[in-house]
Amino acid sequence: MLNWWYNLIDFILPFEWSRHVFMKDALLAILLVMPVFGMLGTMVVSNRMAFFSDSLGHGAFTGIAIGAALGGIKPIWAATIFSIIFAIAITFFKNKSRASTDTVIGVFSSTAIALGLVIMSYGGQFKKFQSYLVGDLLSVSNSDILMLCIVFVLVILLWLIIFNKLLVVSINQSLAKSRGMNTLMIEVLFTISIAVVVTISIQWVGLLIINSMLVLPAAAARNVTVNVRRYHFISIVTALVSGVSGLIVSFYLNTVTGATIVLFSAVFFFITFSMRRRFI
Amino acid sequence: MMIEKHKCDKCEGTCCGLCCTKIEKFEVTIGKTKILHDVNIHIHCGELTAIIGPNGAGKSTLFKAILGEVKHGGELKYLDVKGVRSGNPLIGYVPQYLSFDLTTPTSVLDLFTASLTNIPTWLLRAKKIREKVSGCLSKVKAEHLIDRRLGALSGGELQRILLALALEPVPDILLLDEPVSGIDQNGLELFYNSVSELRENYDLSIILVSHDLELVSKYADRVVLLNGTVISSGTPKEVFNDEKTKKIFGMSWYTDNGNKGDNIKC
């Protein structure tokens, strides 16, 4: 299925790191998933949802535990369904409850992670799940890549449809409501998309750093942009460049790919942070 | 003209050929606190109705109820020119203070494109939209701000931008929450002037929450004194001469002969 890709890489990137099939797979996965992180991240940062998206990661982790405990289907499907429910529940609670958003998210997040850990450690099987904490990007399979393609297309479609409304909601909820926008619906669609992307990526990136993938590229872009289009452009480019550089460097240093990518994004953040005065 | 319109108020059910908005028996309870009860207000097109009241009177809550942000009892009835119920009115809203992240990388053009069109702001930039937005901004003399970042606007500029946005498309009801901070007196007069102009140029009802009684007496056609419920309503003259008003504001600044004392803000 992916022979054309392997041939293409052999042709344009005849380097040591790109000789291996798992690296070619990982590269393709990164080219698909990083732009999605960069795009969704812009609104995670604009909506001040960094903590929220972190809790979605926790929800996904629990979902995997539940999926594994149930058996039968692939844990990832159970996890996806669970984190969608989790995302909807937390969004509703956030909107209906009078407690502060922080508290609501904290309660959900810690309950989810505790539940996940209890299920995973039941019967002393925790070791089996440790890979979900750190993740392994080099384990991407062909069917994973197909799934990533589908997610990639879906997220872009969603973004074409709801982005404008999401932007107005992110600026001010009351303003969006006064313009007849169904803010809750928009918010739910957005959180579902984050939940899905986070859940399927968690096996490669790991719970510990998945949130940085969402937050850092957008945060870096935000420092140096004055309009939405450039914000997106810089965020996506930062995500892609960090992704590819992280993959290559992790190959030579023999380090965890996800974390190496995050370090690159962090460097971009600090560079743009030092330049921000020129733009604001 | 004013008296004629006041008479209009008495013909229940119809709106005398003008469109109108009726707020009937509005009631808002948050938790165990009853914030508004039995609020009845009748608003005509082409009029500027000012809502005044002490702090905690429920002015902002009334707006939130009209916008549907808080649950409320009672009904908001909107009748168009023909007196046929025309469903939900289109509401334009200019908040008192738009709280947003000042560092947001969003330009005025982005805000308008996102609010008015389905063209994905993050992907495309159409020249047509730019011209349209420029047209909207010219209504409030703010064309030059089109590429400005939202966070880089001054309080007065932002207020004008929001006014322009609220006017596109032209709403049936325009809700204005008068800015209390960030705008100097001059900017405030400018704001009132453009609102006054609107009233003449468009067929819309304007409801204004105000804190500046002097400007209210100068510009408003009708005044509603709110304190949990409607305490007094009528022309500025009537309301300001009402004993209940004087009691609430403790004011002797407004006298019948138009002699105004210091500019009281509350």
Image (cartoon, grey):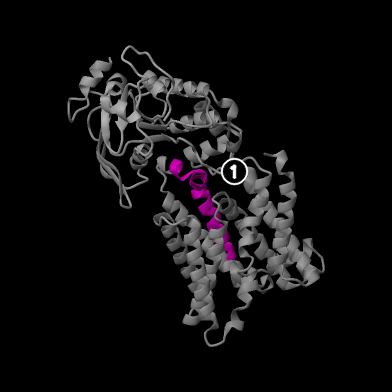
* x and y, in percent, of residue A213 in the image: 64, 60
Q: Which residues are magenta?
A: A148-176
Which chain is disc 1 placed on? B
Is residue B146 shown in magenta? Answer: no
x 61%, y 58%: residue: A214
Q: Which residue occupies the foreground of this view, B41 or A103?
A: A103
> The C terminus of chain B appears in which quarter of the rendering?
top left
| A225 displayed left or right of A90 | right
* x and y, in percent, of residue B28 in the image: 30, 45
Please tell me how crowded label 1 is: few (under 14), some (14-19), or many (20+) other residues with Cα within 10 Å: many
Q: Write down the residue under mark 1.
A: B104
> The N terminus of chain B appears in which quarter of the rendering?
top left
**Is residue B53 positioned above or below B197 on the image?**
below
Q: Which residue occupies the foreground of this view, A193 or B164?
A: B164
Q: What amino acid is found at the position of numbered circle 1 in the picture? A: Thr
* x and y, in percent, of residue B247 in the image: 30, 28
x 40%, y 34%: residue: B92
Is residue B22 visible in the rendered structure shown here? no
Q: Which residue occupies the foreground of this view, B252 or A277?
A: B252
Question: Which quadrant of the figure has residue A25?
Answer: bottom right
What main secondary structure does the magenta stretch of the protein show? Answer: helix
